[in-house]
Amino acid sequence: MKNVLVTGANGQLGQALRKRAGSYPSFTFYYTDIDTLDITDKAAVQAYLNKNRIHTIINTAAYTAVDQAEKEAEQAYRINAEAVKVLAEAARDHHSRLLHVSTDYVFDGLNHRPYIETDGTHPASAYGRTKLAGEVLLQETLETAVIVRTSWLYSETGNNFMKTMLRLGAEREELRVVFDQVGTPTYAGDLAEALLTILDKEEHDGWVPGIYHYSNEGVCSWYDFARKIMELGGLSCRVMPIESKNYPVAAVRPAYSVLNKTKIKDTYGVVIPHWEESLKRIMNDEL
Ligand SMILES: NC(=O)c1ccc[n+]([C@@H]2O[C@H](COP(=O)([O-])OP(=O)(O)OC[C@H]3O[C@@H](n4cnc5c(N)ncnc54)[C@H](OP(=O)(O)O)[C@@H]3O)[C@@H](O)[C@H]2O)c1
């Protein structure tokens, strides 16, 4: 039996992993969040790995408040960069694997075709810079690490775009949503399945270190995503397209952040649903 530590396990992705981990009985999962294991605490992380003989860490813990990070860049850096190094050092010292999650916000969004893993990074926000710093520190410290970049995460738990749209759609007659930011929504349950597939491959000597991209298939704008949520939710709220410049927020988002998933499909045999398919499943409660 191999022990797997899931950090940030009360978050969206952490909860999605909890829900699905039972299908992988050759692993014993240990779930922690900031109240039980603060990943910025080096001594605590080292002691935890030592005591529980952790074979693989899945790091879903992060500072994810994108706009607030513009004001709290140091705090975001401590969690998204320094703590990733803490985990990497502990994994190195205990000969453990580390599966880490990163973001499409490491890119500036000026591409006109889906981003591949080797494309140049150039984050436009403090959040993106701290997440990129985490990737760099991790790869410098632990060459066996696997990093999965994802985008536009949503689920039935936590704060996310789908839940916000459902709430506002029930309260208002009209909503304005940006149409000039294009990417792909990712259902956290699908990403959790992909991470567990990678974990399972490790069991069969199929662990291939490096950076991978994962989102659902397809492309849309936030405006398209909002319209689909209203339609599937049976809400009559009108969704109007607006430009980002008319919806001021603290952090700059990439205008285009579609991820190319060829590498993760070819390497790990991950099967990826289309974003509309997954949204339909979650909204019809078929999960
Ligand atoms: N959400 C998105 O749209 C999105 C898009 C692309 C990539 N990602 C990446 O995907 C991963 C999972 O995101 P998510 O949406 O599941 O995030 P989330 O819901 O914000 O969950 C992150 C969890 O980490 C916890 N945490 C914060 N600081 C910690 C610390 N020092 N030690 C231990 N735990 C700590 C948080 O606790 P508190 O809530 O108490 O802070 C929270 O429970 C992250 O790496 C994120 O950067 C997310």
Image: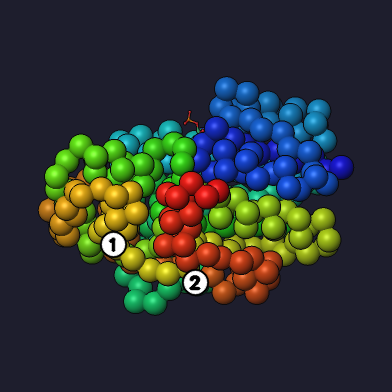
Q: Residue at x 87, y 42 (%)?
A: 1
Disc 1 residue crowd, few under 14, some 14–19, many 20+, Cα 10 Å: some
- Tag 2, which secondary structure? loop
* Label 1 vs label 2, nearer the camera: 1
Q: Which mark is residue 81?
A: none
Q: Which residue is mark 1?
A: 224
Considering only order in the chain, which callout, 2 or 1, is on the residue closer to the N terminus? 1
Q: Position of residue 171 (x, y in %)?
A: 20, 37
| Residue holding disc 2 | 260
The residue located at (32%, 37%) in the rendering is 68
Residue 101 x/y as whole percent: 56, 50
Query: Callout 1: helix, strand or loop?
Result: helix
Residue 89 visible here: no
Vertical arrangement, residue 67 with respect to residue 38, above or below: below
For residue 120, side relative to residue 244 (left or right): right
Disc 1 residue type (three-letter): Asp
Q: Amino acid at mark 2?
A: Asn
Q: Is mark 1 within 8 Å of ligand 1?
A: no
Q: Is residue 287 left or right of residue 229?
A: right
